[in-house]
């Protein structure tokens, strides 16, 4: 409940795996703690798919983390489990600090997208982890986790970092129903699930994957100048100035009429 209740797709929390060497972060959501062995297996498969190897993993002493299923997964990947001392989260200081950073960034994203609602906390957390993968780290020589993990420079045209919750238009995968049907639908930007983009469809609030080439994000709404509303005293002063200007304008009109009449009389007399 502290996270905002169940997410749009039913997640109630997430497991965060942090590499102390590169600073890379992996986030796996769950609807029940019984899914932790599956999440651990998915994380270790990802590590191997990126040509890395995990030999030691530190965990807290939660009962789910020390189950027989977890030990079986760790034995399959030849990983040593190191449980920390009970009641001492400082032994996982790097992971705890990363949790605070994700929470701070995700909270700012949700504050900037109030139209999405609090149930999008999982999407905000996932996108915060994705953005942090490309941010420089002061403790790592100002290198980002992506560079330290892959050894490649960031190609910003492929990263596709946009404003969370920004409105967009996307081409539906099924295409238009007939030749006069609209070729694009409205949605909101909800993050990146490489190589696709996560889109919240406006008409039914479903989360779908759309290719980056079929998405146009309209971020210009966030670059418009802010409209500053005047205070009560400023509004009263502006009204008084407007009244004075209107009164002064009416006097000038009356004087102009009188002057025009006098000039016409003069002209008539001279003509007579």
Image (cartoon, rainbow, N blue to C red):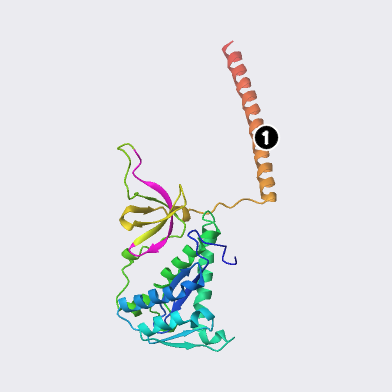
Predominant SS along the magenta part = strand
| Residue 147 position within the rendered picture, expressed as x and y whole percent measured from the top left | 34, 77
- Quarter-of-image position of residue 134: bottom left
136 sits to left or right of 195: right
Q: Position of residue 229 (x, y in %)?
A: 61, 51
Which residue ends up furthest to the top in the rendered image?
272
Was residue 270 drawn as part of the magenta stretch in this picture? no
SS under mark 1 = helix
Residue receiving disc 1: 247
* Nearer to us in this view, 168 or 35: 35
Q: Is residue 72 above or below residue 271?
A: below
Decide if residue 161 is in sight here.
no
Q: Nearer the viewer, residue 81 or 202?
A: 81
| Magenta residues, start to end | 181-195
Locate the C terminus by quadrant: top right
Q: Position of residue 56 (x, y in %)?
A: 41, 87
| Picture mark count | 1
Which residue is located at x 50 percent, y 63 percent?
109
Tell me the residue at 34%/39% (across/down).
Answer: 181
The quarter of the rendered structure image containing the N terminus is bottom right
Q: Can residue 268 be seen in the rendering of this structure? A: yes
Viewer-nearest residue: 261 or 253: 253
Q: Verify whether residue 186 appears in magenta.
A: yes
From the top left corner, tell me how far across and down residue 158 is, in percent: 31, 64
> Within 10 angstroms of label 1, few (less than 14), some, or many (20 or more) residues?
few
Where 129 sits versus 244, above or below?
Answer: below
Asked if residue 103 lies left or right of residue 229, the reply is left
């Amino acid at each position: 409940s502290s996270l905002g209740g169940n997410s749009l797709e039913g997640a109630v929390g997430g497991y965060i795996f942090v590499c102390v060497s590169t600073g890379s972060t992996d986030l796996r959501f769950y609807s029940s703690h019984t899914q932790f062995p599956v999440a651990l297996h998915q994380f270790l498969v990802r590590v191997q798919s990126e040509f890395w190897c995990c030999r030691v993993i530190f965990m807290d002493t939660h009962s789910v983390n020390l189950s027989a299923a977890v030990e079986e997964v760790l034995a399959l990947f030849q990983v040593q489990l190191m449980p920390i001392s009970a009641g001492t989260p400082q032994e996982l200081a790097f992971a705890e600090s990363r949790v605070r950073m994700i929470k701070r960034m995700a909270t700012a994203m949700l504050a900037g997208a109030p139209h999405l609602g609090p149930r999008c906390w999982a999407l905000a957390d996932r996108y915060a982890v994705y953005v942090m993968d490309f941010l420089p780290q002061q403790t790592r020589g100002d290198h980002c986790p992506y560079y330290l993990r892959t050894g490649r420079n960031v190609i910003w045209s492929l990263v596709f970092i946009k404003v969370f919750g920004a409105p967009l238009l996307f081409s539906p995968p099924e295409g238009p129903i007939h030749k006069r049907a609209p070729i694009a639908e409205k949605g909101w930007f909800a993050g990146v699930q490489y190589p696709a983009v996560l889109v919240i469809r406006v008409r039914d609030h479903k989360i779908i994957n759309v290719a980056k080439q079929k998405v146009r994000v309209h971020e210009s709404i966030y670059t418009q100048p802010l409209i500053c509303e005047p205070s009560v005293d400023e509004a009263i002063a502006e009204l008084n100035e407007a009244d004075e200007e209107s009164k002064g304008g009416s006097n000038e009109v009356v004087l102009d009429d009188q002057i025009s009449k006098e000039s016409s009389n003069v002209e008539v007399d001279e003509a007579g």
